[in-house]
Amino acid sequence: MDGFGLVLGHLLGDYIFQNDWMAANKTSRSFPCAVHCTAYTLAVWLCSFWWLPIWALAVIWLAHFPLDRWRLAKLWMERVSGQTKFASAPGLAPWSVIVVDNTMHLTVLFLLGVFVQG
């Protein structure tokens, strides 16, 4: 149930609580990204408050900000993993980047959950 709470919080924060303004501006300006990261972190907390320590919220926020602000999933695909075509090909993009981005966010939550619960 703890892991499900993290996944549900991620989905709520990244999709349900993110409005058009946040989505359109978070990669070009820090303030909209910060607002989105705050909404995201609160969503994760709402779904895991019974076991996630308060300090973990700072970790979640601080990990989420660079991933979204500088589009690290797309940079990873283009510069590190050799997935340039996967990241930009018609029929694949932008969904391929969204999947890699979600995988990065969920990996952060997974590692945090493992660390907190030992």
Image (cartoon, helix red, strand yellow):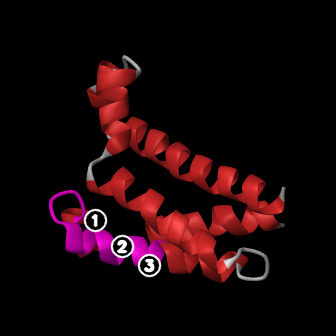
| Residue neighbourhood size for the residue with mark 3, other residues' Cα within 10 Å, grouped as few (<14), some (14–19), many (≥20) | some
Residue lying furthest top: 82
Disc 1 target residue: 23
Q: Are marks 3 and 2 in contact (CB under 8 Å)?
A: yes
Judge from the rendering whether residue 7 lies leftward or rightward of residue 51; answer left or right: left
* Label 3 – label 1 distance at C-alpha: 12 Å
Q: Earlier in the sequence, mark 2 or mark 1?
A: 1
**Mark carried by residue 39:** 3
Q: Where does residue 107 sit, x and y in percent of width and height?
A: 60, 46
Quadrant holding the N terminus: bottom right
Looking at the image, is 89 positioned above or below residue 118?
Answer: above
* Label 2 – label 1 distance at C-alpha: 8 Å
| Residue neighbourhood size for the residue with mark 1, other residues' Cα within 10 Å, grouped as few (<14), some (14–19), many (≥20) | some
Given residues 8 and 70, the one toward you in this image is 70
Residue 18, by quadrant, is bottom left
Disc 2 target residue: 36
Given residues 93 and 30, the one toward you in this image is 30
Whether 69 is among the magenta residues is no
Magenta residues span: 26-40
Q: Where does residue 84 sit, x and y in percent of width and height?
A: 30, 21
Q: What kind of residue is marked 1?
A: Ala
Q: What kind of residue is marked 2?
A: His
Residue depth check, mark 3 versus mark 1: number of the one nearer the observer: 3
Q: Earlier in the sequence, mark 3 or mark 1?
A: 1
Determine the main secondary structure of the stretch shown in magenta.
helix
Looking at the image, is 99 positioned above or below residue 45?
Answer: above
**Mark carried by residue 76:** none
Judge from the rendering whether residue 31 lies leftward or rightward of residue 113; answer left or right: left
Looking at the image, is 80 positioned above or below residue 41?
Answer: above
Q: Residue at x 65, y 67 (%)?
A: 8
Q: Residue at x 61, y 74 (%)?
A: 55
